[in-house]
Image (cartoon, grey):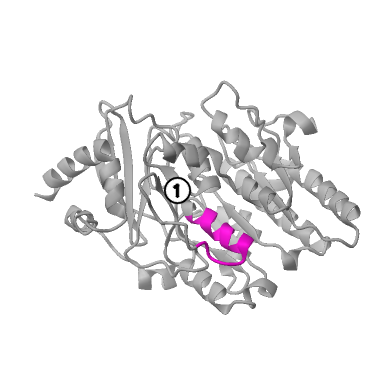
Amino acid sequence: MMAKESSVKATPFLQQMFRSEDEYFVFENARGVSGDTVDAMSGIHSGCTPLDHTEGRKFALNNTIGAEFKRKGYNTASFSSCEINFEGTKWWMMSDMLGGVNFDQVHHPHTTKDPLVNGPAQDDIAMEKHFQKWLEENKKRQGDTRQPFYAQFYYFNGHYPFFNNQNISGTTDTVDGVLSTVDKSIENIVRQLREAGELDNTIIIGTGDHGENLPARGIYKRLKEWDEDILHPMMYMYVPREISKKSPGIYENLRYNTRQLVSILDIFPTILHFLDGIPNENYPVTNEHCVRGFDLLKNKIPFNRVAWSFPGVNDDLSKTKRGILALHSGTSSSLMNRFGWPRRNFMSIVEYATIIHPKRNNESKVHLRDFNDWNSIIENMTGTSDEEVLKKRSHCITSFLKNLAKLSV
């Protein structure tokens, strides 16, 4: 969506982020963990894609970013454009991620009474006024004692059926209109933090859950055509110099990692590092129950990193033979496999579009253009943490390797 020239013009604040070499860090090669919201949201909030439905799923559902801040004594608030009453739906496990006991205040259309304009959601712009009021009340309540706060926002204008506030965007084009309203909403949140005197002491982290494509000829196709557009969400951080200058290694690692392959799983361990002030030495990249991410403050992501995408929380491994798998390596390619669906079995290599600093990014790209390259990557997983994923996802991997062998001949 961001590759169109008109979309670039529609997102001036995001473009400012892209060009920054100081306090904004935009991760050019971010990958989602699944094309399904449930799995993706769980990955963001827990840093875990389950490898089993016992300990792995339990961890993913019971450990959230909000809970970590609440445990540390932060004043916590959740702002959501979408209604967050998910009881009785497949999204029930998202309730604690977006609301529940981990938040001192929860703002969503049911509590704010804002009109629904996008299916079950209000306009993203409406969250601003509630955040501003909360900031003001927070400051008055604290007086001279500054209790740290954690606020999270769940945007929905860019989700089906999509909403373009033409009064804000000034265009009838759906894509540009959606991008423009989200761009303006993020800019206004930053402006409110600045006006409240909090911006120089606040870290901002944003990400898409899985990416999105707009309906072709009126047909909503995202989960039926799970492609590179879906698995390439935007991911960014704002880290004030007041914070990063205290540890030069943080700035250097973040800047380096903006050009490496990162996963939305990396957000959770990175936030824990910010929260505790030290890296969590006991947080593994993988174990027998979860695929996890890297702490982006502590690590320079290696060029040969492998990232995974497959159903986790929302996939009952004991009852289904369906499998969806994407394997990512380098900064440009993904090998995808989908089987168990008639007429939709395929494997392909895709090249992700480069929309940020294209000349610089080309210098460090790792091109993987045929299946022999991918076969080599899989063979080299023996003895690494990624071998655990191969073992646990055997029902996916068996078909994956068979198809790979055929295509490599």
Q: Check if residue 273 falls in the magenta segment.
A: yes
Q: Position of residue 292 (x, y in %)?
A: 43, 52
Q: Nearer the viewer, residue 355 or 105?
A: 105
Q: Position of residue 189 (x, y in %)?
A: 73, 54
Residue at image point 15% right, 41% down = 402
- Side of 262 relative to 370 (left or right): right
Q: Residues within 10 Å of mark 1 (few under 14, many from 20)?
A: many
Name the amino acid type tagged 1.
Gly
- Side of 204 relative to 51 (left or right): right
Residue at image point 17% right, 41% down = 403
Q: Main SS of the magenta segment? A: helix
Determine the secondary structure under disc 1. loop
* Above or below for 103 versus 285: above
Q: Check if residue 1 falls in the magenta segment.
A: no
For the magenta stretch, what is the residue range?
A: 266-280
Q: Position of residue 141 (x, y in %)?
A: 89, 51
Q: Nearer the viewer, residue 262 or 371?
A: 262
Asked whether residue 341 appears in the rendered view, the answer is yes
Q: Position of residue 55 (x, y in %)?
A: 43, 39
* Above or below for 131 versus 359: above
Q: Which residue is mark 1?
A: 32
- Residue at the outermost top position: 88
